[in-house]
Amino acid sequence: MTHTNGTYHGASGALFEIHDLHVSVEGREILRGFNLVVGHGEVHALMGRNGSGKSTLAYALMGHPKYLVTQGSVRLEGENILALRPDDRAKLGMFLAFQNPIAIPGVGTGNFLRAAVKAVRGTESINALAFRKELAERMQHLQIDPSFATRALNEGAVRIVSDGINLVHQQQDRMGILLITHYQRILNYVRPDKVHVMARGRIVESGGAELVQQLESEGYDPILQRLGIEDTEEATSHGR
């Protein structure tokens, strides 16, 4: 990332850039100068204890009205997306997925996906037969049982999500992934290119995939203690 005469111009060729992001929730600042650059084809894992600001970051990126951005920029392919509505951000290619989503009985996965495709593509109508064919092909590529389309929304497992991420990443080599988690389990299946540790609303440590193993064996204490960050300070973020 570069600055010229006090103006931020971004990292050359980056897919996704977050610069000096400050976000407040109900009058309390949670993100305090968050910075991150994700290149084309990269998988970044963002980890941290409850209260470090991970959920606030995710919701702010997707435009949740409760999360007020007070400073900074978020750029996708060079375009600042903070002024865009959530649906417009989705149409540009941003989406938020959950590794442990809550199942919604009565809402079929296939019907939900068709509605989502219609909203993103902006078409007046989608032929049901053509959509079912496309869905079946995508599910076959992801090695997902065809019965998954008739299940209630979000019934499934972490392994299915992980396999899907890996396959999409292989097929879409320019797609960037930001995996926000405090569970090391999913990182047993998805190998990140870069790993970041978040505390007090910003990234405080970065490294390669080996950092996951360090956190697995040692926890967050050595990093936080070295930086002078106490548990009580993390707890004040109201679990966000």
Image (cartoon, rainbow, N blue to C red):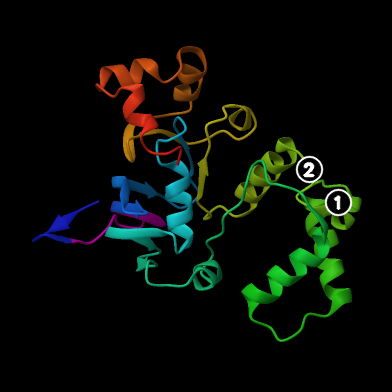
Residue 206 visible, this orientation: no
Q: Position of residue 67 (x, y in %)?
A: 41, 57
Q: Quadrant of the C terminus?
A: top left
Residue on which disc 2 sits? 156
Give the SS element for disc 2. loop
- Name the kind of residue labelled 1 in the image: Phe
User: Which badge, 1 or 2, comes first in the chain's sequence?
Assistant: 1
What is the secondary structure assignment of the residue under circle 1? Answer: helix
Image point 60% across, 48% down: which residue? 169
Q: Which residue is mark 1?
A: 148
Tell me which segment is drawn in magenta. Answer: 8-20
Question: Around disc 2, counting alpha carbons within 10 Å, would you say few (fewer than 14), some (14 to 19), or many (20 or more)?
Answer: some
As drawn, which residue projects farthest toward the front?
Answer: 26
Residue 206 percent across, percent down from the top left: 36, 31
Residue 43: x percent and y percent?
50, 42
Q: Quick one: 134 or 59, which is closer to the camera?
A: 59
The picture quadrant where one finds residue 95 is bottom right
Write down the quadrant of residue 82 in the picture.
bottom left
Crowd tier of the residue under label 1, counting other residues whose Cα lies within 10 Å: few below 14, some 14–19, many 20 or above: some
Position of residue 19 relative to residue 197, above or below, is below
Tell me if I can see residue 51 in this picture. yes
